[in-house]
Image (spheres, rainbow, N blue to C red):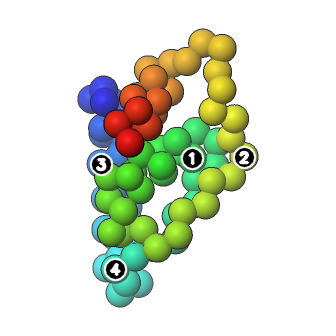
Amino acid sequence: MTEATEQMVNDLNSIVMYLQVKYHTEKIVLLGRLRGSMLGIMYALRDLEKVLVYIVAGHNFMYEKPDEFTRDFYAVLETM
């Protein structure tokens, strides 16, 4: 995973940790839309214990010319 993608996943984790404290919960409901759906999948695979439900909305994962982030996404899926 590239440094930029890793930073986005870490940023999402910071948001999740904030929500866990604010709402006194261990698990959250996560919704990913468009590119956020790929980010959410990468996050959920890494920190599944923090995710109660993950909803993917409105994304087509097929690109003619995938960018670095999309390549990172597919690399994560290949490790499953």
For marks 1 and 3, the one nearer the N-term is: 3
For marks 2 and 4, the one nearer the N-term is: 4
Measure the alpha-carbon separation of dots 2 and 4: 27 Å
For marks 1 and 2, the one nearer the N-term is: 1
Measure the alpha-carbon separation of dots 1 and 2: 8 Å
Measure the alpha-carbon separation of dots 2 and 3: 23 Å
Q: Using the image as rendered, state which of residue 34 and residue 72 is in the foreground.
A: 72
Above or below for 58 versus 48? above
Would you say the residues marked 4 and 3 are in contact, meaning their CB atoms lie under 8 Å apart?
A: no
The percent coordinates of residue 72 (x first, y second) are: 40, 28
Which labelled disc corresponds to residue 26?
4
- List the residue tagged with mark 2: 58
- List the residue tagged with mark 3: 10
Measure the alpha-carbon separation of dots 4 and 3: 17 Å
- List the residue tagged with mark 1: 37
Q: Nearer the viewer, mark 4 or mark 3?
A: 4
Judged from the image, the secondary structure of the residue bearing numbered disc 3 is helix
